[in-house]
């Protein structure tokens, strides 16, 4: 990038230290940041409305001639109104401006202008207040609207951007190599930046957007491939033979065909030339844990140590109990390491890990701590992968010498996206549920029917089952606790007298959380009221009904995920979505969740309605911040950028050539904010 991009924003005309501070709130500190601070949307001045048929309450653009001179009204001290009447071919419009003396000279009688604002109608009159306007021949087609911060208006940002654009050197260095630009029909960086801010036409805006999204995805994929290259290496830990049959015999159930197949795929990787690097995708309840255990078994039998990382302590505890039970019985040494492991025990575990006195360690992020060393780490498994960043995975992997990697995810994402989000992992799909699993009957009700739903839950509890209730979501994080507490209290006092109600929320210490979970698992709690902390992995088969408040606030994939907490045992299970939304689209989404239990179908529906951006832009995946790519609606640019990244890396894997120099710098910059760091 040209040095202009490093220039302090204060250098720009009209930006003093006060305004600079406001810009900083928007994370804009340099001229480059400003040029990359893209409009949130655009005022469309190219689509002209008739005054009489202007939309109600929504801004629009009208084209009209001034028919009266601007009249000045002194209302009170410091307040002057300017009123002017304009007409198009069919109707008149009365426009009012406040304290804007400039309009007096600008809006001359007979002149034709475009006015952008909200047309209000009262009886037979049309009114507009403080519209933006421009002479017909000078009006922009599209005008940028920037995300604002208190004290900084979109117009002020626009002015600053205009200033910055005039400083642009003739040629700015473009991270996308010329050959790639040509091949994929992309405009240059400067054109893109100019047009993303001040598009000459909707077409040029579309070109600019495509180019910028392409660039972000290209950087992303180049970086991810780099991560992958660091991960893929020769197989130093060969699995001696497939011990799966021995393992399956340890389980109380018969594995599904899919479990057997996926385990075989993994074992074959681990016996192969290069280290395994595989994503195991399976809907909630498809039995990923048993698959993981099977891999652990064969790996440990072959003399390796295994690290199994999960996102929450609850989940770590639960897995620990299962693995200790199954693998422990086979003489394998299983331990758990989390943030709340007592210090002395932590020390001992770390020592044991280093001297290979532990075969399998299950843990949370605590495993990533610098002083955790492994004697012989041969296999790394991460559960609920979407909760971890790429670099966290890389960090755990770096604790061994090119160990095998299996990542497990219950968030089914369509294949094209999986390739992006997970780089170039091989993918195995657990597409078969354990036998006897019933569909979870899902209902969508409005708040009025809540009492009936409570009655239904009571009946189920009286039959000896248990229930989850996911608390209402509220906006402020501080009151999450009070809201959950109040909800639980109200439930206990007004609706479920005599029932045992437990509360689980994100602010609890892990000790307390485990205590509650244990009590719930032991059947000492009838209803577990919880915030979304239960979303991931928790397994209490006797809990068969879940009621979710404010269902409209969740993505449908997330609802499906939450719902996966029930339907884990032999009993018929139910999910009740409570929502008072009036939005047709939201209602349709909720109905989709009711209609199918197939996670991949739901994900594809999600993809259709929200676009791939929501998957990629979401911080959930731990990917670097993307400014525009989060908004893509077209899968093609995804595939094109992927092809481009592959093409570039094929001929220049280290990006050491001159034409890839800017690209390399930008990739490093994009990934520099990623936790755990990243380097070329
Ligand atoms: P997930 O894929 O969501 O992680 P789990 O591994 O937690 O699913 O499995 C869900 C439940 O199904 C567990 O109670 C587990 O013991 C059970 N299970 C897994 N595989 C089988 C199987 N082949 N037959 C019967 N039950 C199984
Ligand atoms: Mg699981």
Image (cartoon, rainbow, N blue to C red):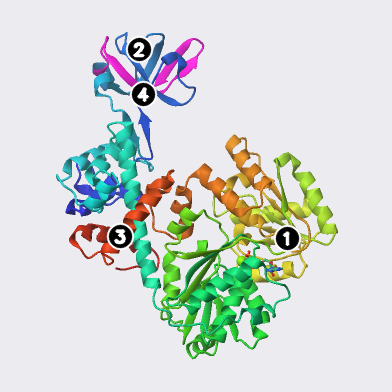
Q: Nearer the viewer, mark 3 or mark 1?
A: 1
Q: Nearer the viewer, mark 4 or mark 3?
A: 3
Between the residue at mark 2 and the residue at mark 4, the CA separation in whole angstroms equals: 12 Å
30 shown above or below 509: above
For this view, does 238 lie left or right of residue 523?
left
Callout 2 crowding tier (Cα within 10 Å): few <14, some 14–19, many ≥20:
many
Q: Which residue is mark 4?
A: 131
- Under circle 1, the secondary element is loop
Task: Identify the mark nearer the N-term, 2 or 4.
Answer: 2
Magenta stretch: residue 325 in it? no
Between the residue at mark 3 and the residue at mark 1, the CA separation in whole angstroms equals: 46 Å
Q: Nearer the viewer, mark 4 or mark 1?
A: 1
Magenta segment: 106-132
Q: Quadrant of residue 14?
A: top left
Disc 1: residue Cβ within 8 A of ligand 1's nearest atom: yes
Label drawn at residue 86: 2
Label drawn at residue 437: 1
For this view, does 76 lie left or right of residue 620?
left
Q: Nearer the viewer, residue 373 or 407?
A: 407
Q: Quadrant of the N terminus?
A: bottom left
Between the residue at mark 2 and the residue at mark 1, the CA separation in whole angstroms equals: 69 Å
Q: Which residue is mark 3?
A: 667
Between the residue at mark 4 and the residue at mark 1, the CA separation in whole angstroms equals: 60 Å
Disc 3: residue Cβ within 8 A of ligand 2's nearest atom: no
- Examine the rendering and report whether any part of residue 313 can be seen: no
Task: Identify the mark nearer the N-term, 2 or 1.
Answer: 2
């Amino acid at each position: 990038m040209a040095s202009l991009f490093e220039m302090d924003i204060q250098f720009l005309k009209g930006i003093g230290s006060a305004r600079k501070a406001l810009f900083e709130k928007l994370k804009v500190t340099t001229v480059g940041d400003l040029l990359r601070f893209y409009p949130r949307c655009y005022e469309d001045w190219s689509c002209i409305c008739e005054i009489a048929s202007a939309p109600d309450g929504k801004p629009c653009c009208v084209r009209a001639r001034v028919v009266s001179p601007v009249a000045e009204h002194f209302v009170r001290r410091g307040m002057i109104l300017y009123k002017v009447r304009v007409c198009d071919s069919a109707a008149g419009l009365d426009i009012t401006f406040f304290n804007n003396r400039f309009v007096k000279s600008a809006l001359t009688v007979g002149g034709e202008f475009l006015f952008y604002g909200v047309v209000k109608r009262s009886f037979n009159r049309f009114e507009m207040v403080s519209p933006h306007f421009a002479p017909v021949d000078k009006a922009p087609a599209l005008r940028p609207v920037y995300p604002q911060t208190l004290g900084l208006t979109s117009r002020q940002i626009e002015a600053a951007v205009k200033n910055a654009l005039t400083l642009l050197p003739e040629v700015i260095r473009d991270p996308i190599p010329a050959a790639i630009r040509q091949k994929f029909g992309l405009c240059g960086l400067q054109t893109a930046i100019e047009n993303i801010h001040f598009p000459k036409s909707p077409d040029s805006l579309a070109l600019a957007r495509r180019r910028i999204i392409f660039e972000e995805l290209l950087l992303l994929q180049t970086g991810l491939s780099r991560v992958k290259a660091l991960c893929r290496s020769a197989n130093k830990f060969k699995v001696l033979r497939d011990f799966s049959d021995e393992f399956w015999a340890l389980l109380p159930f018969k594995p599904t065909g899919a479990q057997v197949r996926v385990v075989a795929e993994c074992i074959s990787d681990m016996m192969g030339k290069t280290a395994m690097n595989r994503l195991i995708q399976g809907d909630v309840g498809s039995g990923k844990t048993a698959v993981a255990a099977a891999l652990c078994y064969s790996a440990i039998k072959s003399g390796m140590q295994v690290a199994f990382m999960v996102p929450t302590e609850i989940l770590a505890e639960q897995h620990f109990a299962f693995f200790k039970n199954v693998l422990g019985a086979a003489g394998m040494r299983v331990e758990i390491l989390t943030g709340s492991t007592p210090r002395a025990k932590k020390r001992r575990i770390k020592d044991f890990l280093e001297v290979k006195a532990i075969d399998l360690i299950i843990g949370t992020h605590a495993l990533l701590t610098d002083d955790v060393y492994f004697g012989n780490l041969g296999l790394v498994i991460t559960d609920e992968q979407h909760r971890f960043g790429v670099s966290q995975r890389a960090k755990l992997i770096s604790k061994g010498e090119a160990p095998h990697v299996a990542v497990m995810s219950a968030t089914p994402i369509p294949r094209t996206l999986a390739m992006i989000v997970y780089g170039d992992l091989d993918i195995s799909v657990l597409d078969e549920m354990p036998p006897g699993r019933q569909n979870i009957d899902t209902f969508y009700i409005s708040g009025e029917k809540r009492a009936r739903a409570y009655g239904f839950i009571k009946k189920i509890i009286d039959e000896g089952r248990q229930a989850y209730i996911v608390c209402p979501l509220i906006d402020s994080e501080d009151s999450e606790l009070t809201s959950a507490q109040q909800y639980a209290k109200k439930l206990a006092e007004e609706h479920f007298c005599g029932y045992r109600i437990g509360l689980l929320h994100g602010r609890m210490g892990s000790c307390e959380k485990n205590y509650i979970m244990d009590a719930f698992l032991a059947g000492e709690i009838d209803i577990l009221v919880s915030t979304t902390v239960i979303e991931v992995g928790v397994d209490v088969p006797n809990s068969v009904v879940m009621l979710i408040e404010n269902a409209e606030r969740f993505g449908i994939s997330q609802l499906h995920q939450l719902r996966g907490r029930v339907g884990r045992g032999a009993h018929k299970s139910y999910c009740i979505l409570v929502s008072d939304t009036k939005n047709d689209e939201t209602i349709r989404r909720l109905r989709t969740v009711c209609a199918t239990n197939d996670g991949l179908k739901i994900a594809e529906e999600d993809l259709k309605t929200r676009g791939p951006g929501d998957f990629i832009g979401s911080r959930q995946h731990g990917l670097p911040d993307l400014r525009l790519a989060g908004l893509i609606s077209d899968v093609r640019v995804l595939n094109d950028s992927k092809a481009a990244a592959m093409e570039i890396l094929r001929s220049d894997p280290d990006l050491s050539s001159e034409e890839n120099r800017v690209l390399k710098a930008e990739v490093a910059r994009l990934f520099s904010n990623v936790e755990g760091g990243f380097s070329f």
